Amino acid sequence: MSEPTPPVLQAAGLTKTYASGDRRIAVLRGVDLLLRAGESVSIRGESGAGKSTLLHLLAGLDAPDAGELRWNGDRIDAARCTAIRNRFLGMIFQSFHLVPELTAEDNVLLPRRIGGRVDAAARRRAADLLARVGLGERARHLPSQLSGGERQRVAVARALMNQPSLVLADEPTGNLDERTGEAVITLLLELVAETRTALILVTHNPAHAARTSRHLTLSEGILHHG
Amino acid sequence: MPWYVHLALKQLFPAGRRFPFFTAISVLGVALGVALLIVVTSVMGGFGYEIRRMIVETEGEVQVKARGLIDDPAAVLQQVRRVPGVEAATPFASGVVMVMANGRPAYPAIRGLHLDTVGGVVDLAAYVRLGTLEELDDDSVLVSSELARSLGVTIGDTLEVYSPLIIERLRSDEVFLPREVRVVGLVEIGHQQLDSSMLYGTLRLVQDLYGLGSAVHGVNVRARPGVGEDELARRLNAGGLPAGLQAFSWMDSFEEFLWVLNLEKGMIFFLLLFIVIVAAFSVMSSLLISVVRKTREIGLLGALGASSRGVAACFCAQGILIGCFGTLVGLGLGFAALAVRNDAVMLIARLTQREDELRRFYQFSNLPAHTVPGDVATVVVLTLAISFLAGLVPAWRAARLRPVEAFRSE
């Protein structure tokens, strides 16, 4: 039996409550999650179940009311994790979120640019990633000149640019037709497997969820296995 | 290049778009303000510069004067020339006379020149348009061009000159005949007032007309190159001029006038600066709209690891870049406008048929302009500072936006 890979992400007792008028709504009620390098996990749940809230907490974009988060074993404080996030995490969104004024290549390079200098090696990596997602010839195109599927493939390349430990994908096929969505998921799973990057995939699609190594469901603020 | 500058440049000048409308309008607003400031400060500076040129070239940088007359000009000249920094000195006498020609009267000022020494201080020959300075003697005068035109005289004609001495002579029942002098040259300095009312004669002629004997009214002094007029006046006053004499730089003599000129320039600069401020408000408003429009992108930048300070710097950089481009375009427009100012003014005057009024009003035959590097630096620094401030409010709004709120707004 092989040794388990080191934990990339550890969440313990994450709790988040929102105020709605006089009421307090508990969106997450003590979520525990352990994710190891190279592991892929899908999270399903009904709309409003708190999937996006959970992703925001795991990405350090929002602070939990209670609980603890560790990235590569280090405890993370949401207020001070911005610089670490640049190297640790890649994010993919339902609405692609490409910068419209930047070319596909510049969008892919953006995380590296934010993290420091863009050198020849970075440009080579961006070109390789774009070629890997099938857009080598479209590097100089603006997002407005790309189809939805192509934009999401650029977003996938961008998420992997800084060789992160973890990729968080929030319903990445939500704005794509079934066939294009299938192609994007296949590409994403192939790339994270090749680079041994951990993946959390939030999706409504049971077929996409079934292709990850572990399947979780978020219901009434609690993460259920299976 | 830092990412926020790169992104700011890309947002202002997006790839694949030939005419970025928002950027062009914002840059144009700033550019118009800068161009106006450059044109106005240069023209106002030009008036001051032309007046300095006119005074210095016709009178020298410094004048030595007594309360009354200088009775022994030779001794004073000798003392003045010994002071370090003095290039040359020449005595003068001046006053107002009445002249008659062709039955027309005029009341010009007359300046008596010491022909042996005047060339070292004043290059009057350079302004003689018709005739020559060499022909000037005690029975002739040089006449300013406009005065000659209004009297209807030219070279070879005779003028009758009446000095204030006639009043004294009439009191003692003496008969006083006007002095008849020949016109031997026409002078054009380039200043309307001087060109319309000046006579230049020999020192002896003016001394005779005013009954001065060998006395003079003052001594004009030319400074050596590199010696400032104030410094030279200070040296002369410290260098033992005879009692009762004092040296004045041309700026001392025209202190109040120069103060008014500088005040006007300052006031106009201050008022025109509001154009840049209004343009900056327009830039600020556009950038604020951009912050709202780009809420999700700002959230994305945070998700990719950009700090709030970096996001703020991106919007601040856009304000500064608009300021930089606006300043560059404005400097180009301003200097281009200055290059064609005389053609433009004359065209307007011709179209409105006001050429003569314009010439009388502006004093100079051309609209003067003199650009002082300090004025340009002030315009550039103030414009960049205002543009930076215009970017601060949108930057602050963008920095306050938390990524999670940006995504929640979807």
Image (tube, rainbow, N blue to C red):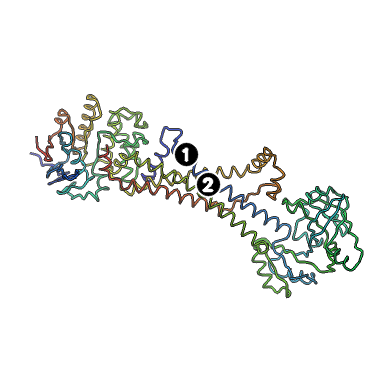
Q: Residue furthest left?
A: A1
Residue on which the image places disc 1: B25
Image quadrant where residue B287 sits: top left
Q: Residues within 10 Å of mark 1 (few under 14, many from 20)?
A: some
Name the N-terminal-most of marks 1 and 2: 1
| Residue B34: mark | 2
Q: Residue furthest top?
A: A179
* Three-letter amino acid code at the position of disc 2: Val
Say yes or no: labels 1 and 2 on the same chain: yes
Residue A139: x percent and y percent?
35, 32
Q: Is residue B112 above or below residue A83?
A: below
Write down the quadrant of residue A9 in the picture.
Answer: top left
- Amino acid type assigned to the residue bearing label 1 in the image: Ile
Image spot of residue B379 (x, y percent): 52, 51
Give B281 or B297, whichever is nearer the viewer: B281
Of residues B266 and B72, the one drawn nearer to the viewer in this rendering: B266
Q: Eyeballing the image, is B288 above or below B245? A: above
> SS for tag 2?
helix
Quarter of the figure with the C terminus of chain B: top left
